[in-house]
Image (cartoon, grey):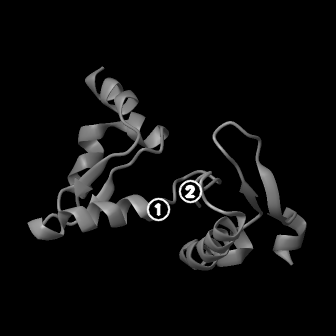
Amino acid sequence: EQRRALLNKYNIFMADDRILPMLSKALGTDFYKAKKLPIPISLTRQEALPFAIQKALSATYMSISKGTCIMIRAGNTSMTPQQLTENIVEIAAGAVPKMPHKWANVQNIAIKTPESVALPIYSKTPEVLRE
């Protein structure tokens, strides 16, 4: 119950990268289902803490789960269309090589806000992917 209250109270969680592997059991499955995994930051240098927090907040993260869908945050509504486009291109270039079977596993790329439907910007049918 306390974990769910913590999960609902904050939008972002950060943790020292040295203890991150131990947190999965302590946080429970609710954090994973909500896709609010802690962002790793290095706390070894205290004077660099503000920089580490800012860098973590401005970065994007990908976690490959057992399912077939991966969501990667590309930006926010205060960004220009040009900035969002550049981010999406960079994410695709950086994320796809880390996925099993690379582009052969990418069936769809879409843009979505929390309140919108997904707008597809790349789509391949399973038949085309097998070729």
Q: Quarter-wise, where is residue 18 in the image?
A: bottom left
- The amino acid type found where label 1 is placed reads Tyr
Q: Looking at the image, which residue is at 62% across and 74% down?
A: 96
Q: Is residue 62 above or below residue 91?
A: above
Q: Which mark is residue 73?
A: 2
The three-letter amino acid code for the residue at tag 2 is Arg
Q: Nearer the viewer, residue 130 or 55?
A: 55
Circle 2 SS class: loop
Residue sitting at 81 percent across and 63 percent down?
121
Marks 2 and 1, Cα distance to the nearest angstrom? 7 Å
Point out residue 83 in the picture as x, y percentages from the top left corner: 64, 69
Tell whether 28 sits left or right of 115. Answer: left
Q: Residue at x 30, y 47 (%)?
A: 24
Mark 2 nearby-residue class (10 Å; few <14, some 14–19, many ≥20): some
From the viewer's side, name the closer residue of 29 and 80: 80
Question: 54 or 43, which is in the foreground?
Answer: 54
Q: Looking at the figure, which quarter contains the N terminus?
A: top left
Q: What is the quadrant of residue 47 in the picture? A: bottom left
Instruction: Residue at the far top: name it.
Output: 1
Check contact, mark 2 vs mark 1: CB within 8 A.
yes
Looking at the image, which is closer to me, 97 or 77? 77
Secondary structure at badge 1 equals: loop
User: Quarter-wise, where is residue 50 in the image?
Assistant: bottom left
